Amino acid sequence: MSLGVDAFGSKNPGSGSSGVMITSEPLMGGSNYLAWASSVELWCKGQGVQDHLIKKASEGDEKAKTLWEKVDAQLCSILWRSIDSKLMPLFRPFQTCYLVWEKARNLYTNDISRFYDVISRMTSLKKQELDMSTNLGQVQAVMEEFKTLMSVSASIEKQQEQ
């Protein structure tokens, strides 16, 4: 069932987000959070709705806010389907994309054991008997994971919370 306007801007009442999948592998926890988050961000960017991950609501007139809420509810439903059913009790209370996204980020980017693992992998990186592009890819993957764990916020309150 569609609300008349789906996440992709379609006004066809028969279209909806029921069969849409953001990522092929659901969020299983800290072990695949980075891959899941990258897939979600890329999908949302491709649909032109990435602002739903970083903003609580649309600023503007009442009509724009109503449309934002409809699209956000549909996107939140799609986002929920990208999360493993065992984790859903943690996420079901959050009914906006922003809140689901923040909950996942807070749960899986402040994990001290994961931080230790990333630092260990960074300090033990060495050239293996692989081609140079594979070695560089491994270095970049570890560095990206480190950047995600050490994300810096412009807000002092947000930084202290991290």
Image: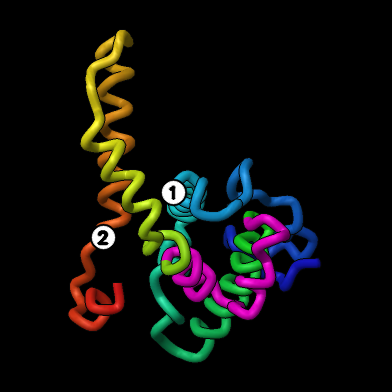
Q: Position of residue 118 (x, y in %)?
A: 32, 44
Residue under the image location 18 percent in, 72 percent down: 154
Answer whether residue 101 is magenta in the image. yes
Q: Residues within 10 Å of mark 2 (few under 14, many from 20)?
A: few
Residues drawn in magenta? 83-105
Q: Position of residue 116 (x, y in %)?
A: 32, 50
Q: Is residue 135 left or right of residue 39?
A: left
At horizontal 45% and vertical 60% (from top left) the residue drawn is 108
Q: Is residue 75 rendered magenta in the image? A: no
Amino acid carrying mark 1 in the image: Leu
Label total for image? 2
| Visual colour scheme | rainbow
Going by the numbered disc 2, the residue's amino acid type is Ser
Report helix, strand or loop for mark 1. helix
Whether residue 66 appears in this view of the structure is yes
Figure quadrant of the C terminus:
bottom left
- Of the image marks 2 and 1, the number of the one nearer the N terminus: 1
Counting other residues with Cα less than 10 Å from the Cα at mark 1, is it few (<14), some (14-19), or many (20 or more)?
some
Q: Quadrant of the N terminus?
A: bottom right
- Residue 67 visible in the current orientation: no
Question: Which of the 4 image quadrants contains residue 111?
Answer: bottom left
Q: Residue at image x 53%, y 70%?
A: 100
Q: Is residue 75 above or below residue 40?
A: below
Residue 132 quadrant = top left
User: What residue is pinned by disc 2?
Assistant: 151
Picture residue at 63% right of the left edge, 57% below the top: 83
Q: Secondary structure at mark 2?
A: loop
Residue situated in front as seen by the camera: 57 or 85: 85
**Vertical arrangement, residue 110 with respect to residue 99, above or below:** above
Q: Is residue 150 left or right of residue 29?
A: left
Label at residue 34: 1
Image location (x, y in percent) of residue 107: 47, 66
